[in-house]
Image: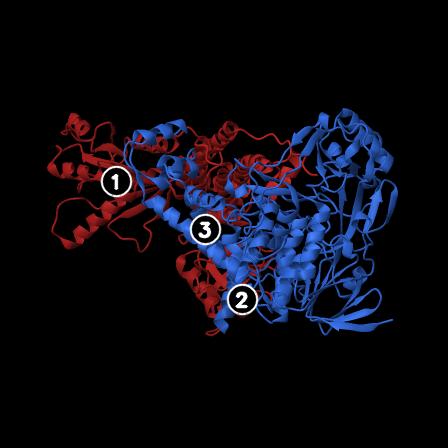
C-alpha cells in the first residue's frame, strides 16, 4: 500500500523506491473490479489530454479541446486498428485545480472487467503508465494538495470497504484526529516550556515546576495517548474488517454456513479471482462492519499432497483470524478428528457452533463445554438458516465490547500513526520513570521532547521554535 | 583624497567581539590581516552587561576556546565574579557566567591583538567595500585610504546607521556614545545586500556610592571557580558580589503614567527588539499582573564606581528614568552616570549568507556578529571566529569549516541564522539545540579541539595536553568498569547514607556511579583512595559514565540526521526545473539555497513532501551522470 511509502524512511530518504518517477502520466481503473454498472479510468499527468486526443472521438466533431470541469460524450477508439471499443463519457479537469494538481481525465465506460481493461490498455498503449496503488494521492501529496495525515486518510478512504470505515476516514480528513493529537502535543509542549524556561533563564524568578507536577501532567498525557492507541483495534476493524475463520472437519456444514450468511447479508465481493480455492474468502457487512469470512478446507489427517497444502493454508487462516467459528456436526458424536482440530485452535477466540440442529442431536453438549471451556455455544441449522442472528450478535459484541463508542470518538486507523503514538507513549513512560528517579531535568526534558516530536510527526509539527515562543509569552524574562 | 595605503589578505571591519575573534583567527592561520575600528579605545567593548556567558552563551564561549579563540581566556584574565548556573539541572545545561571588569577586558584583548603576528590594528571608519567582478578588491576608509585585500569580514555590530533614543530625544550614534558608521550601509545596499533594522536597549549606569546595598540581597560568586578556558585548570581571585532588588507597584505606576513618553511607544522606533531583552516598559505592559520584577545591580569593574542596573533597560526620558530607579528599594538616592537608551541599527538579513558566513553573492565577503541579526557578545564572537577561519580558508583556497548542529552550539547558531533567518536579535538558548546532551559545555574541548588544532589555532603543546587528559579520563572509566565492589559493610553504610539501596552481590563501580545519588567523589570515598585526577577530569569521568545511555541515544539520533546533512545539493541547482515543489518551497529554496538536504528540511515552508520531491530530483540528477 502507498501508506508504506510515506513512512519516515521514505521521507527522510532512507529507503526509496528507485523506479519511481513523478513527471510521467499515469492511469488506473479507479472503480472496484466487479459487476458494477460503470467503470472509471482515471488519467493524470502532463500528457493526459494528448492521450485523450488520440483515443477519444467526441460524438460532435466540433466538441474538441478541453475545458475544465466539463464532460463530453463520445467513443474510445483504438487509433491503430481504428476500432471502436466503447461508448463513453469523458470528464476533463485542467490543472492546477484538480485532485493531483495535474491535468486529469476520467473515462466513464461501461462496467465489467473486459471493457474496462480494454479501455485501460488503449490508454496505456498511447502513452500512460499503469499507476501504482494510491499513486494519484501520492501525487496530490507531492504537489502540495494534501498534507501527510490527509494523504494517509485519503488512502484509507480509498481502501475502506464499508460505510462506517468511510465515516472514520472522513472525520480524519476533517481534522478531528489531528485536533486530538494536537491537543495532547500542546500539553506536552507546555510541560517542556515550563522546564526549559527555568533552564534557559535560571537567573530570573521563574517558578520551577516540581517533579511531582511534571509527573502528573505526563501521566495525564499517557492516559490520553493510551485511549487513542486503543482505538486502533476498532479502527483497524472498521477499515480492514474483522477476519472470521470457519473451521471444522469435512462435511460439518462450513460452506453451508458461509452461503447462508452470504445470502442473509449483502455480499460485498465474491470469490476474489486468483485467490486459492483452498480458503474461500467472503466479505459480509454485519452491523456496519466489514467481516471477512474464511471458509477453510476441512481439516483432517491425510497423505494427499494437495490436501496437505490446503490444510496448511487453513492453519494460516486460523492464525490470522480474530475469531474462529468452530463447527460441530450435531447429528454425530464428537470424534477424534474434532478433538485434534480443537488442539490447533485452543488459544483462539472461538465460538462453538453446533450445526444440523434440524436433525437429531447426538452430540454431548457437556463434552463440547469440556473441550472448549468458557466459549459461547450457538446452535444453528445452516440449511434452514436458523440461529444465524446469534452469530452476528456475537461478532458485533466482539468488536464493540470495548467501552469506547466508535461512532463519536476519534479513531486511529493508520499503522504509522499507531506506531508513532505507541513510541511516544513509551518515551513518556520513560520520562515519568526518570522524573520519579531524580534523574537530572536536562535528560527528562530531552525524553519528553522525543515523545512530543513523535506525536508531531503525525501532524508534521516539531517543537523547537514553539517552545521558545511559549517561554517568552508565558514568562517575563530578560535584562 | 584617495591613496593606496597597503595590501593585506584580509580586512576585518569592526573590533568588537566578533571582529577580535575573526582577526585573531585569520592572523593565527597565517593570513596578513588588518583590523579597523572607529575608535581603538572601544575594542572589545561591552556596551551592555559587563558579563560573559550564561545559558547557551557559556557553551559558545567554551567552544570558541576549544577552537583556539580568545573570549574564554580573556574572560579568565579579567573576571571579577563567576557562577556556574543550573547546577542541579543536569550537566547538559550547566552554564558558566562571569562578571567581567569591562575596562580590563578591553585592555587585555587589545594587548592580545597588538601582540599578534600578522595582525595590524587601525583606527578608521570603513566607508566602502570595493568589489570587482563579484570578487573583493579593497576597502576604503573615511579619509580615503585604500587597502587592497582578498577578503573582508564585516563585524560592525550595532554601529551601522546607529540611532539612539531616550524619550523624545534621538540622535545618530553608535553604542556607548561612540560614533556611528553612517556610510557603509549604503555601500552594502549598492552591493545588492538586503538590510533590516533591529533595535536593542540598555539600562542606566549609576554611581555605586549612591546605592544603599543594605536593602538588597547579596549575590556572591561561586566558592569553587570553574574557569572558562580549558587551558586554565584553576583560578583563585577575590570576587565581588552582585546585588538583587525588585521593582514595586510605585515603580510600575511611574512607568505607566509616563508610558506615552517612551520612545518605544511613540512610534519613533521602527526596529524590531528582542523578546528576551524587553525594556521595563514592555515588561509591565505585557505582564501587567506581575507585582514586581527583579533588578540586578552589577559592578562594571574594580576601578570604577559605575554599576549596571540589569532588568531595567528603557527608552523613557532621563528625568522619568531617575524617578523610576529611585522608586526601588536601595536606589532611593541613586545618581545616574549614563542614562538608559534604546538603539536602532542596520543589520543584514542573514538568509543571504552561506553556512560558512560568506555572502552568497560575493566571494570572499563574510559577515559576523550583530550585523547578522544576532545579539550578545558570545554569539558575536562565535560567528567571528568562524568567519575569520573561513576568510582565511578562502584566501588559502581551502574548504570552509561548517560546524554541524550535532557538533556545536556554534553550528546551531549559524545554521539557525542562515537557514531560518530571524525577525528579532537572535539569542542562543540551550532549548535551540536538539542534541543538547552531546553539546555540553564540559566537553566542548573534546568536540572541537581537533578542528582547532588542524587549522593551526591550537598549539601542539595544548593539543598534547588535551590528549594526555583524554587518556587519563578513559583509563579511569575503564578501571571503574573493571572494578567490582563487594557488598561489604563499609560500602553499604555509604550507600545507605547517600539514600540509595544497598548491594547484596558484587557490583561494578561504574554501575554505582550511574545511580543518581552516587557521585564520583562518593565512589572514591567507598574505595578509600585519593584520586589523582584534576577537577575537570573527575567531572568528565562522572558525566561520561552517568549519562552514557542517554548520550549514546543522542549520538544515534544525530547520526540519523547526518544522513541528510551529508546529502549535498549541487551549488548550481535550478529549483525552477524541479516539478512538484510547491510554490512557497521553491521560492524559499531559491532564496536560501541550502547546501544540504538536511539544511533544506529546516527551512520554514518546505514540507516533507517538498523534501521527497527534492530527494527524488537529486536522485534523478545523480543517475543521469
Residue B570, above or below B480? below
Secondary structure category for the residue under label 2:
strand
Mark drawn on residue B126: none
Residue B207, above or below B425? above
The hue of chain B in the figure is blue
Residue B602, above or below B301? below
Query: On the image, numbered disc 1 is attached to which residue?
Result: A246
Where in the figure is residue B233, as x and y percent of width and height?
53, 47
* Residue at 27% over, 41% down: A245
Residue B594, above or below B198? below
Type of colouring: by chain
Mark 1 chain: A
Query: On the image, numbered disc 2 is attached to which residue?
Result: A56
Do callouts 3 and 2 point to residues on the same chain? Answer: no
**B292 on left or right of B326:** left
Mark 3 chain: B
The hue of chain A in the figure is red
| Nearest to viewer (mark 3 / mark 2) | 3
Q: Label 1: few (<14), some or many (≥20) within 10 Å?
A: many
Total labels: the figure holds: 3
Q: Quadrant of residue B392?
A: bottom right
Where in the figure is residue A28, as x and y percent of width and height?
46, 59
* Residue at 83% over, 41% down: B263
CA distance for labels 2 and 1: 49 Å
Mark drawn on residue B555: 3
Amino acid at each position: 500500500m502507498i501508506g508504506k511509502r510515506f513512512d519516515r524512511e521514505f521521507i527522510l530518504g532512507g529507503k526509496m523506491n528507485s523506479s519511481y518517477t513523478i513527471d510521467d502520466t499515469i492511469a488506473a481503473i479507479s472503480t472496484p473490479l466487479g459487476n458494477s454498472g460503470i467503470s472509471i479510468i482515471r488519467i493524470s499527468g502532463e500528457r493526459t489530454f494528448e492521450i485523450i486526443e488520440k483515443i477519444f472521438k467526441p460524438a460532435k466533431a466540433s466538441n474538441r479541446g478541453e475545458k475544465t470541469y466539463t464532460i463530453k460524450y463520445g467513443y474510445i477508439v483504438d487509433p491503430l486498428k481504428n476500432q471502436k471499443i466503447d461508448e463513453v463519457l469523458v470528464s476533463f479537469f485542467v490543472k492546477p485545480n484538480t485532485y493531483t494538481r495535474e491535468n486529469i481525465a476520467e473515462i466513464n465506460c461501461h462496467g465489467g472487467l473486459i471493457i474496462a481493461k480494454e479501455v485501460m490498455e488503449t490508454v496505456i498503449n498511447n502513452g500512460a503508465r499503469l499507476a501504482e496503488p494510491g499513486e494519484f494521492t501520492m501525487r496530490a501529496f507531492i504537489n502540495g494538495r494534501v498534507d501527510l495525515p490527509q494523504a494517509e486518510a485519503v488512502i484509507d478512504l480509498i481502501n475502506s470497504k464499508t460505510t462506517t470505515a468511510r465515516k472514520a476516514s472522513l472525520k480524519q480528513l476533517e481534522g478531528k484526529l489531528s485536533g486530538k493529537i494536537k491537543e495532547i502535543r500542546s500539553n506536552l509542549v507546555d510541560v517542556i516550556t515550563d522546564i526549559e524556561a527555568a533552564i534557559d533563564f535560571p537567573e530570573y524568578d521563574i517558578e520551577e515546576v516540581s517533579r511531582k507536577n511534571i509527573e502528573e501532567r505526563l501521566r495525564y498525557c499517557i492516559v490520553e495517548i493510551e485511549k487513542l492507541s486503543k482505538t486502533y483495534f476498532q479502527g483497524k476493524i472498521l477499515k480492514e474488517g474483522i477476519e472470521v475463520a470457519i473451521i471444522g472437519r469435512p462435511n460439518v456444514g462450513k460452506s453451508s454456513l458461509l452461503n447462508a450468511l452470504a445470502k442473509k447479508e449483502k455480499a460485498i465481493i465474491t470469490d476474489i479471482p486468483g485467490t486459492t480455492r483452498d480458503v474461500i474468502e467472503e466479505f459480509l457487512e454485519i452491523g456496519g462492519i466489514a467481516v471477512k469470512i474464511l471458509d477453510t478446507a476441512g481439516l483432517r489427517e491425510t497423505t494427499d499432497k494437495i490436501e496437505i497444502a490446503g490444510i496448511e493454508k487453513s492453519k494460516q487462516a486460523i492464525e490470522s483470524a480474530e475469531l474462529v467459528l468452530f463447527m460441530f456436526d450435531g447429528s454425530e458424536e464428537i470424534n477424534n478428528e474434532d478433538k485434534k482440530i480443537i488442539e490447533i485452535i485452543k488459544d483462539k477466540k472461538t465460538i462453538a457452533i453446533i450445526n444440523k440442529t434440524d436433525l437429531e442431536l447426538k452430540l454431548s453438549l457437556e463434552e463440547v463445554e469440556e473441550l472448549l471451556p468458557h466459549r459461547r455455544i450457538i446452535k444453528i441449522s445452516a440449511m434452514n438458516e436458523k440461529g444465524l442472528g446469534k452469530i452476528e450478535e456475537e461478532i458485533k459484541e466482539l468488536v464493540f465490547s470495548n467501552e469506547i463508542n466508535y461512532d463519536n470518538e476519534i479513531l486511529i486507523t493508520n499503522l504509522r500513526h499507531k506506531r508513532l503514538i505507541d513510541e511516544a507513549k513509551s518515551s513518556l513512560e520513560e520520562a515519568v520513570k526518570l522524573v520519579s528517579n531524580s534523574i537530572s531535568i536536562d535528560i527528562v526534558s530531552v525524553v519528553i521532547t522525543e515523545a512530543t516530536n513523535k506525536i508531531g510527526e503525525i501532524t508534521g509539527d516539531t517543537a523547537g521554535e514553539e517552545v521558545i515562543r511559549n517561554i517568552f509569552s508565558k514568562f517575563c524574562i530578560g535584562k | 583624497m584617495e591613496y593606496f595605503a597597503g595590501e593585506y589578505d584580509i580586512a576585518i571591519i569592526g573590533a568588537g567581539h566578533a571582529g577580535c575573534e575573526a582577526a585573531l583567527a585569520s592572523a593565527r592561520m597565517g593570513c596578513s590581516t588588518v583590523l579597523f575600528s572607529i575608535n581603538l579605545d572601544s575594542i572589545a567593548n561591552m556596551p551592555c552587561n559587563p558579563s560573559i556567558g550564561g545559558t547557551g552563551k557559556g557553551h559558545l564561549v567554551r567552544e570558541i576556546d576549544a577552537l583556539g579563540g580568545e573570549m574564554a581566556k580573556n574572560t579568565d584574565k579579567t573576571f571579577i565574579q563567576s557562577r556556574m548556573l543550573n547546577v542541579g539541572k543536569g550537566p547538559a545545561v550547566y552554564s558558566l557566567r562571569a562578571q567581567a571588569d569591562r575596562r580590563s577586558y578591553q585592555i587585555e584583548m587589545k594587548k592580545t591583538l597588538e601582540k599578534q603576528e600578522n595582525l595590524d590594528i587601525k583606527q578608521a571608519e570603513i566607508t566602502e567595500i570595493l568589489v570587482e567582478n563579484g570578487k573583493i578588491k579593497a576597502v576604503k576608509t573615511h579619509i580615503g585610504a585604500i587597502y587592497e585585500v582578498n577578503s573582508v569580514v564585516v563585524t560592525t555590530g550595532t554601529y551601522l546607521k546607529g540611532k539612539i533614543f531616550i524619550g523624545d530625544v534621538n540622535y545618530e550614534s553608535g553604542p556607548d556614545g561612540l560614533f556611528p558608521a553612517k556610510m557603509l550601509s549604503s555601500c552594502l545596499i549598492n552591493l545588492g545586500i538586503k538590510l533590516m533594522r533591529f533595535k536593542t536597549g540598555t539600562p542606566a549606569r549609576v554611581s555605586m556610592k549612591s546605592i544603599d546595598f543594605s536593602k538588597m540581597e547579596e549575590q556572591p560568586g561561586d566558592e569553587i571557580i570553574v574557569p572558562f578556558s580549558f587551558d586554565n585548570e584553576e583560578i583563585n581571585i577575590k570576587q565581588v558580589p552582585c546585588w538583587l532588588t525588585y521593582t514595586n507597584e510605585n515603580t510600575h505606576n511611574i512607568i505607566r503614567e509616563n508610558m506615552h513618553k517612551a520612545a518605544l511607544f511613540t512610534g519613533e522606533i521602527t526596529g524590531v527588539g528582542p523578546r528576551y531583552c524587553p525594556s521595563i516598559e514592555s515588561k509591565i505592559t505585557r505582564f501587567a499582573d506581575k507585582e514586581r520584577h527583579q533588578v540586578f545591580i552589577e559592578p562594571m569593574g574594580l576601578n570604577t564606581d559605575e554599576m549596571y542596573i540589569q532588568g531595567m533597560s528603557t527608552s523613557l526620558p532621563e528625568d522619568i528614568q531617575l524617578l523610576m530607579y529611585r522608586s526601588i528599594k536601595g536606589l532611593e538616592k541613586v545618581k545616574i552616570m549614563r542614562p538608559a537608551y534604546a538603539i536602532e541599527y542596520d543589520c543584514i538579513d542573514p538568509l543571504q549568507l552561506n553556512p560558512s558566513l560568506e555572502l552568497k553573492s560575493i566571494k570572499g565577503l563574510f559577515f559576523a556578529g550583530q550585523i547578522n541579526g544576532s545579539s550578545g557578545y558570545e554569539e558575536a564572537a562565535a560567528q567571528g571566529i568562524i568567519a575569520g577561519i573561513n576568510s582565511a580558508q578562502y584566501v588559502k583556497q581551502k574548504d570552509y569549516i561548517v560546524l554541524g548542529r550535532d557538533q556545536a552550539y556554534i553550528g546551531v547558531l549559524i545554521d539557525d541564522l542562515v537557514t531560518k533567518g530571524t525577525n528579532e536579535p537572535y539569542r542562543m538558548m540551550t532549548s535551540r539545540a536538539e542534541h543538547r546532551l552531546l553539546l555540553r559545555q564540559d566537553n566542548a574541548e573534546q568536540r572541537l579541539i581537533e578542528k582547532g588544532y588542524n587549522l593551526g589555532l591550537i598549539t601542539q603543546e595544548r593539543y598534547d595536553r588535551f590528549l594526555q587528559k583524554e587518556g587519563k579520563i578513559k583509563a579511569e572509566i575503564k578501571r571503574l568498569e573493571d572494578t567490582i565492589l563487594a557488598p561489604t559493610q563499609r560500602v553499604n553504610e555509604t550507600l545507605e547514607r547517600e539514600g540509595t539501596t544497598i548491594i547484596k552481590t558484587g557490583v561494578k563501580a561504574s554501575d554505582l556511579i550511574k545511580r543518581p545519588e552516587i557521585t564520583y567523589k562518593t565512589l572514591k570515598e567507598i574505595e578509600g583512595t585519593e584520586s589523582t585526577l584534576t577537577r575537570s577530569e573527575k567531572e568528565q569521568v562522572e558525566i561520561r559514565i552517568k549519562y552514557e545511555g542517554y548520550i549514546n541515544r543522542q549520538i544515534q539520533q544525530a547520526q540519523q540526521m547526518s544522513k541528510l546533512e551529508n546529502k549535498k545539493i549541487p551549488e548550481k541547482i535550478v529549483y525552477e526545473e524541479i516539478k512538484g515543489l510547491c510554490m512557497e518551497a521553491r521560492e524559499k529554496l531559491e532564496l536560501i539555497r541550502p547546501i544540504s538536504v538536511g539544511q533544506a528540511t529546516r527551512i520554514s515552508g518546505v514540507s516533507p513532501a517538498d523534501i521527497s520531491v527534492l530527494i527524488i530530483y537529486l536522485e534523478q540528477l545523480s543517475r543521469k551522470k
